[in-house]
Each structure stands twice: as structure tokens, then as C-alpha cells.
Amino acid sequence: MSATQPQSGCKLDQFFKLTERGTTVRREVLAGLTTFLAMVYSVIVVPGMLGQAGFPHTAVFIATCLVAGFGSLLMGLWANLPMAIGCAISLTAFTAFSMVLGQNIPIPVVLGAVFLMGVLFTLISVTGIRTWILRNIPMGIAHGTGIGIGLFLLLIAATNIDLVVKNPGAGMPVLLGDFTSFPVMIALAGLAVIFGLERLKVPGAVLLVIIAISVIGLIFDPNVKYQGFFKLPSLGDDGLSLFFSMDIMGALKPVVLPTVLALVMTAVFDATGTIRAVAGQANLLDKDNQIINGGKALTTDSVSSIVAGVVGAAPAAVYIESAAGAAAGGRTGLTATVVGVLFLLILFLSPLSYLVPAYATAPALMYVGLLMLSNVSKLDFGDFVGSMSGLLCAVFIVLTSNIVTGIMLGFASLVIGRIAGGEWRKLNIGTVLIAAALVAFYAGGWAI
């Protein structure tokens, strides 16, 4: 029997369809570890951001782990897709700095808004509206979203290690950072090593580099310290203070309701675009270029936001870093299941999360970002308007650091371009309606 083929009688193989999707248990576990290490920073970043807005740090840490654990397990065991879920960093920032600190909305009302957003999001998913949106995303914009997310991952990784920094003066908004700094040099070296190992088809190459750089950081970087192995989460008043504390009636007040709708609109297109891009990276599209088990995937991440409101966290979404697991060979829900289990374990192993610095995961994110740029070759340049709209979508995702903004500009330019170019017959009513809704969302000032 080939080493790349799992035993046909294996229960895991039958449940997750490993053979059918050309993968193995070992490959899926490695992919899960890779995704987990690429996104474990969320258990530090999310509590830190919400903590600045007055959320109890311990309670948010527990909630963040629970949301990631629940969402990823549901995605793995129900949708059977290699996509991990966690508290969305962009929506976490909006929750903390706009809703609480900016609009002075009380924390229970904010959690009520997150809960309502999850309910509306789920209704949109289970009624087929999100599936309809997916089916009406033109292929040029779908590929453009994948390109844009790849560029976005490169930007995230580069800024996390200060390879690229903000320009404090006039001119272009970013500059080259300190090229000779330890994080930059070791991250770029790690990226080059990944190139070599992938060329040699070394199994788990991305994960090996993450682990190796983490060990090097522990030895040579004084900021990376071993803080222990096991730590029980605090389940006292602080630890469970946010459970079921959402004020739903407060979130229904006219002053808060527009914010709820803005969260829903942003989540619909942001998460939908991310799911489509990760599915494409993992070759999990059917003959009609639709996501395999797409309906379940869309429902899973919306239900996870309901859970987030209940336990006291920010809205949930599929993480872009799931593409790292797809690049490592993840093709089934076993990858997401591994991620979910690890996030539940990190509740008791929280000190270990500090052993994986940003420069250890940066090479993985940059590598995946580069892989996603291959979507350029999938653009049909024979369809000039469609391909240019896709490229416009891609460029503005990274220029604005906002996936929805790129999608909006892509849709708007496609519709106007088709009409101006005499190709209005190529438009369908769904594409026009989505374009109109997105433009109205931005023109009305509701965009996040």
C-alpha cells in the first residue's frame, strides 16, 4: 500500500473522505498544526484589544479559545473543510475602538450587538442568501479576491515583524523597516528555507520552519521566555463574568441597530470572500467553481458569531491563516478539527502560546500569500473588463487593508465597465444587485 494512501477501512478516512480528497491523516494533522501556529496569536491579540476597552482580560481569553475551538470543530466535523475559525481581528478592533471607546456603547450592549449580528448572519446563511451571493460573484472578482488576500497576508506578515513600517512623514504611506533586525532577518531566511524545502517536497516544511524559528527565538531572543507549560484558566468572577451577559434589547435601540447592520454587511462579504479564497487554495471547488459543502461552511462561521456573543468575545470568522494549512496539504475537516482541539487545549497550556513569536509565523504567511498570487494565471484576460475588475479588487484589498472595500470596487467597476463597453448582456441581475448594495453601503457611511 502506498504511503500516501490511508487505509480504506479507517474510520477517519471514511468520515473525513481522506482518500477521496487525496490526503492522509498525517498530512491533515500537520496542516492543522500549521494553521494553529499561524493563528494562535489571536489568544493574545484579541484579549489585549478588548482589554483596552474595559473587557476583563481573563474572560476574553477564555471566550476567544472557546469560540475558536467550537467554530473550528464545527467546521471540521460538520462541514468537513480545512478552515479554522476565530475571533476576527478586524471586527475585534471595531468592537473595542469604535463601539466601546468611540461610541461609548456599554459592554453588555456590545455583546448583544454581536449576538444579534450572529443571528442575522445565520439567517442570511441558512436561507441561502450567502450561497446566492457566492454564485453571483463573477470569476474575475473571485480570483481577484484570492490575489488580494494573498497580498494582504504578505502585508500582515511584513508589518508584524516591522519589515514594512508606517511612513511618519510626507510621501508614500509605508517604508522599509529595519532590515538588519533579528525578526526581519530570521523571518526572511525562514521564507527562503521554506522555498527550498517545498522544492524538495519535504512533508510539513512550513510547520518545521515555524518550530525551528521558535526554538531559535527562545535561545537568542530575550523577549521570548519560557513561562511554564500548564496553567488552569481562572473560572472565578473574572473568568466567567461575560458569559450570557449580552443586552439584546439594548442592541435593538435605534442608536445601536445601524452598527449591528454594518457588522452583518461587513461579515457577509469579508467572510464569504475569505472562504472562497481558502477553498480555491485547497482545490475544494466543484466543476461549477462552487465551494464543496459551501452552505455548511457559511453557516458554521455565522453560528460561531452567535456563540461569541454568548461567551463574551468579538464576532467570529474564518481566518485567512487557514490558507497556511491548505498550503501544507490540508484538504478535509480533520485539519480544522485538529485546530479546534488545540484551541481548547490552549485554555490549559496558555504559557506555550508566548513561545511562538510573530517572526516565526511570518514566513508561513508570506509563503501562503505568494502562493495565492498564482490566481493571476486564472484570470481570463480575453475578458478584459472582467479581468481588470478582478485586479482592481485585488489591489484595493491590500491598499485599504479591507477585503470588503476591494470587493465593492470590483463589483462596481465590473457593472459600469460592462455597460460602458457595450457588454451589458453579460451582466445578470444578481451581480447588479450586489454591486448596488455594496455601493449604497459605502455611500451611506456604514462601512467598517
Image: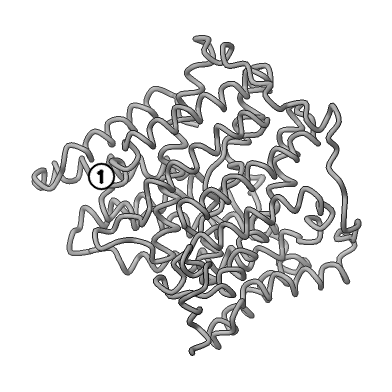
Between 355 and 387, the one lying in front of the other is 355
**What residue does disc 1 label?**
136
Whether residue 158 can be seen here: no
Q: Residue furthest front?
A: 9
Quarter of the figure with residue 289: bottom left
Above or below for 94 versus 413: above
Residue sitting nearer the eye, 313 or 431: 313
Residue at (58% x, 42% y) in the render: 88
| Residue 183 seen by the camera | yes
At x 41% / y 59%, what residue is drawn?
279
Image location of residue 231, percent across then percent down: 87, 50
Compared to 121, does 385 lie above or below?
Answer: below
Q: Is residue 115 left or right of residue 284?
A: right
Q: How crowded is mark 1: few (under 14 residues within 10 Å), some or many (20 or more)?
A: some
Q: Is mark 1 on a helix, strand or loop?
A: loop
Q: Which amino acid does label 1 sit on?
A: Asn
